[in-house]
Image (spheres, grey):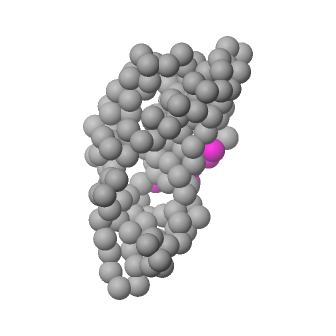
Amino acid sequence: MTNFKLTTDPLNVQDVIDAVRSPKAGAVNVFIGTVRDATDGKAVERLEYETYEPMALKKMEEIAGEIKQRWDVVEIAMHHRYGLLAIGDSAVVIAVSSPHRQTSFEACQYAIDTLKQVVPIWKKESFEDGDVWVMPHA
């Protein structure tokens, strides 16, 4: 089973972990992306994420499908927040369970790296002197 969510509400890390727990899994790997207070030495005031929800959820499903083809995973969950976020807020939580830890590490890293590349979620960083739309891996 997979679990995908886009929301304006604060993310609950434990909910994401619980979504992937299974007696078949000996490992659960979790990635939590948080809003940091600076980019390239410049103070960030807040972030804003926008998304095209139907396509974003479809792309998350596609990523999960790719992961299941490449790795022996039990469950995958991806939750991403959109709207205005403050410093310290969780923007994305991804969890992957698998029988063994190495698989869960690799699959979780692939999930976040691929999500940032292909899922239509756009990030705007706000600074004291203006806003900047951030391009993935730019």
In percent of the image, x 38 and y 69: which residue is there?
Answer: 125
Foreground: 26 or 86?
A: 26
Residue 115 visible? The answer is yes
Residue 56 is left or right of residue 19, and the answer is left
Q: Quadrant of residue 119?
A: top left
Q: Quadrant of the C terminus?
A: bottom left
State whether residue 104 is above or below residue 1.
Answer: below
Q: In the picture shown, does residue 58 fall above or below 7?
A: above
Horizontally, residue 125 falls left or right of residue 55, namely right
Main SS, magenta region, reads loop
Q: Which residues are magenta?
A: 8-13
Residue 12, percent across and down? 62, 46
Query: Which residue is painted at 49% across and 19% down in the image?
Result: 71
Residue at 71% x, 21% y: name it. Answer: 26
Determine if the magenta segment contains residue 125. Answer: no
Residue lying furthest bottom in this view? 129
Residue 22 in sight in this render: no
Residue at image x 50%, y 54%? 91
| Total numbered circles | 0
Q: Is residue 51 left or right of residue 71?
A: left
Residue 51 drawn above or below residue 38: above
* Image location of residue 132, percent across then percent down: 31, 71
Residue 18 on image: x %, y %: 66, 31
Location of residue 35 in the rendering, given as x and y in whole percent from the top left corner: 52, 62
